[in-house]
Image: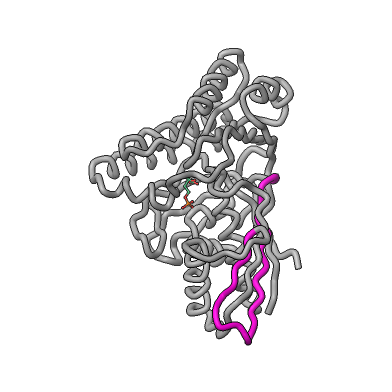
Amino acid sequence: MKATAKAHVNIALIKYWGKKDIELNLPLTSSLSFTLDKFYTKTTVHYKKELIEDQLYIDQRYITGPEYERVTKYLSKIRQMYNIPYYAMIESENYVPKKAGVASSSSAFAALALAATRAYGIDLSEKELSSLARLGSGSAARSIYGGFAFWNEGYDHLSSYAEPFNGFEDMAVLVCMVDDREKKISSRDAMLELTKNEENKNDWIENTNDFIEQIKEAFINDDFDTVGGIAESHAMLMHYYMQEDGIDYLTDQSFKIIDLTEKLRGQGFPVYATMDAGPNVKILTKKEYIKDVIGSYEKLAKVTVCYKGEGAKIIW
Ligand code: PMV
């Protein structure tokens, strides 16, 4: 009746932004990510007969309000799907700044999906687990896997899941933290704006689908510069549509890091920037170039060097 799972954060090279089904968390398009080793969530789910409601602790704090509601609603869905008759004590530890655009919900819901099923003896395939994690937070579908993952948009619950994707073994990501405070608008709320404008929504879908074709081809050709270039352009496109909706996550400091990245590229270093729903910038590069570029980034931000992280797993 008890299990602890660990799952790592993932960073998207092709972003998930906008839903075609809000209840099921079906995305407007497929997306592609890389799971990071340094940032993760550890979650214990303990079903107890005597509980009359779920209890949630995050980083040793007792949680009530909207954060609690989101988790208990998600667990209720799992209880209903797998006939689990008990409430649970949920304890979660985050080794990642929450809600600062470092994708903490990806690791959180991947770990929760795994712990909540295994605590009741339910052993799902990775594919089923990915669909289940998606119901909690879209990006969590990809954190089931280590390394690169491709999330197929799908058309219903079971067809919308992520799977492993073959990519560069020497991939590295410099996470440049310019601000680790909680963001004002959650990505969940912000991305709903896109679907309110039919024209922007359709343009986003069309462009993203083109980028997906191109990036897949670049992976096949082992062409890191094209992969990085597409990832950077796609992130910029997402931020363009966010701005169209009046949402601005990037700060002057973010732009300084983006400018530095362009400058370093001019000097021949393969570095590419990507940003999510927050001001922090992640630099996609390869292991061998870190020593050449890290000093410049450290002048502008607190930098964490990340490599390939593992997929979600049970730790006890
Ligand atoms: O999984 P959510 O609802 O937190 O959305 C994640 C959205 C982005 O991080 C901005 C993009 C992505 O694909 O991870």
Q: Closest to the observer: 213 or 23?
A: 23
Q: Quadrant of residue 117?
A: bottom right
Residue shown at 26%/48% (left/top)? 196
Q: Is residue 49 magenta?
A: yes
268, above or below 163, in the image: above
> Start and end of the magenta stretch?
37-58
Q: Closest to the observer: 87 or 64?
A: 64
Judge whether residue 277 can be spotted in this image: yes
266, above or below 56, in the image: above
Residue 44, how many percent across, how many down?
Answer: 67, 68
Residue shown at 42%/52% (left/top)? 188
Residue 256, how many percent across, how many down?
Answer: 53, 22
171, above or below 310, in the image: above
Q: Is residue 158 left or right of residue 242?
A: right
Residue shown at 66%/58% (left/top)? 59
28, above or below 206, in the image: below
Q: Quadrant of the N terminus?
A: bottom right
Q: Quadrant of the C terminus?
A: bottom right
